[in-house]
Structures are given as C-alpha cells and as structure tokens.
C-alpha cells in the first residue's frame, strides 16, 4: 500500500518517496504520497516529480489496486524507473483551495440539515445536492449563517470509529447515495468544533483546513432544481 501522507499531514507540500512500479496506463506508483487521489468528490492533486536526471509535471493522482496511489503525468515523457527515489512537489495553492472548499461544504450541510445526494469540490467553488423538495425561503440568511460558522474559527480534527460502530449509528452518514468505505476495520470521521462547540461530525476521507477561519468568506450561488426532489446548492470562495 501507499502511505497516505496527505492524510497524516494535509499541509505537507514536499516529500521524498520511492517508485514502486508503473500502471499499464502510464501512472507512477509510489510508496508514500502527498498527492490526494481522486475520490469522494475531491479532485486528485497536481504538482510535479523530481528525480536524478528528470522532472515531470503531474496532472492528477488516482487510486490504484492494492491501496496504492498512481500519479498521472501531465505529458508524454520518460518516467522515473522502478526503485528510483523521487521528490514530490505539490501544487499547494490548488490543494489548499480544495481544502477550503471541502470544509466549507461540510459547514453547508450544517446550515442546510437535509440528506445529501451528491457533491463536488473544485478550486474555486463546490456544490452539494440535497434531498430538498422546496427551495430555501431565505438564501441570504443561509449565507450569513454559513459565514458565521466560518468566522467562529472552529478547530477541524479527525477521529476513527470501527465499521461496527458506523453500522450501529448510521445517523452520522449524511450522504444518501454513497456509504463510507468499510471493510478495513475502521472509518475516518471529520469533526468540526469540540465539545459543546461541535457543529459537525461525519465520515470523510478528504483533506481539510485546520480551522474554519482559514476558509475565508464564502458566497452561496444559484440553487438549481435537479430532479423531483433534488436541489443543487453551489458555494464559492470569495478570494
């Protein structure tokens, strides 16, 4: 398996690794990764790889068989050979914006406490689809409540529960269409706030900011009807 450095330290911008193989499609398999692989609505990270005699831009990262991470080159070029030590350099600005948007979407699910039917994260904006038969009466009030949570500068932390604990308390799962991955014995939870100030706790494998204040101001955009009961709510970073 690839050691998920993006999970243990989402603020890590550079790290050493070793090439452990290549995929049939030309991806580079590494033993430890600061690149988040596409999943859970969050895009894979981009950046570059540097090794003795070579440098290669990375377009994205994907999950590969056996719990490994494959880095996808942005151009056709010579790949670092198996066994080669490499240095990973993350496109930090893009990743950090993903983190800000992702945490903001968790807060959006707090101010709109309805089941989530889908979602997507981008570097400028993100969206959640809700099981929402009727549109909200006051979008401005929702935006104000969302930014109030951001402004409280709440800590964002992680916890872990067993598969059995998750099955015993399905109420912490907000998504209707996708269940958190189980089968590895435990599931990661992302917590916003602590103790009496906790506002959210839900399963999530993505990267997040350390405190909500880091998100900055966000704006709620248009709310689109997507099907009989689904409505899509988009938010955007103000800077």
Image (cartoon, helix red, strand yellow):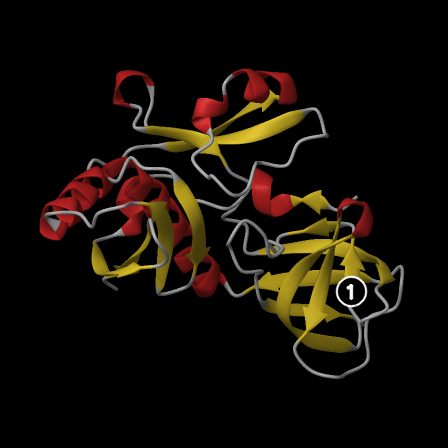
107 relative position to 47: left or right: left
Q: Quadrant of residue 199?
A: top left
Residue 141: percent from the left, percent from the top? 10, 45
* In the displayed structure image, the side of residue 151 where residue 66 appears, left or right: right
Quadrant (top left/top right/bottom left/bottom right) for the C terminus: bottom left
In this view, the residue in front, 186 or 10, is 186
Residue that label 1 marks: 28
Number of labels in the image equals 1
Q: Is residue 89 above or below residue 65?
A: below
* Side (left or right) of 157 relative to 61: left
Q: Tell me where residue 67 appears, x and y as whole percent.
A: 76, 45
Say which quarter of the image contains residue 168.
top right
- The answer to whether 11 is drawn above or below residue 44 in the figure is above
Residue 180 placed where, x, y %?
58, 36
Residue drawn at 22 percent across, 47 percent down: 134
Task: Return the residue nearer the eye: 161 or 215.
Answer: 161
Residue drawn at (50%, 18%), measured in percent from left and top? Answer: 169
Tell me what residue is drawn at x 60 percent, y 29 percent.
Answer: 187
Q: Quadrant of residue 107?
A: top left
Quadrant (top left/top right/bottom left/bottom right) for the N terminus: top right
């Amino acid at each position: 398996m690839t050691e998920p450095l993006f999970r243990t330290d989402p603020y890590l911008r550079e790290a050493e690794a070793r090439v452990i193989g290549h995929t049939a499609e030309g991806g580079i398999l590494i033993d430890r990764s600061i690149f988040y692989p596409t999943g859970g609505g969050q895009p894979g990270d981009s950046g570059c790889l540097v090794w003795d005699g070579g440098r290669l831009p990375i377009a994205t990262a994907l999950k590969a068989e056996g719990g490994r991470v494959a880095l996808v080159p942005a151009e056709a070029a010579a790949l670092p050979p198996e066994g080669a030590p490499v240095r990973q350099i993350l496109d930090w600005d893009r990743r950090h914006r993903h983190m800000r948007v992702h945490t903001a979407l968790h807060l959006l699910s707090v101010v709109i406490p309805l089941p989530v039917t889908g979602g997507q994260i981008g570097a400028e904006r993100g969206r959640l689809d809700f099981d929402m038969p009727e549109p909200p009466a006051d979008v401005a009030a929702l935006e104000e409540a969302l930014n109030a949570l951001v402004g409280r500068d709440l800590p964002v932390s992680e916890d872990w529960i067993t598969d059995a604990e998750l099955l015993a308390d399905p109420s912490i799962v907000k998504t209707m269409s996708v269940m958190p991955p189980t089968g590895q014995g435990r599931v990661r939870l992302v917590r916003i706030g602590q103790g009496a100030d906790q506002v959210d706790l839900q399963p999530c494998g993505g990267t997040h900011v350390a405190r909500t204040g880091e998100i900055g101001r966000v704006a709620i955009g248009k709310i689109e009807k997507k099907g009989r009961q689904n409505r899509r709510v988009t938010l955007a970073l103000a800077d």
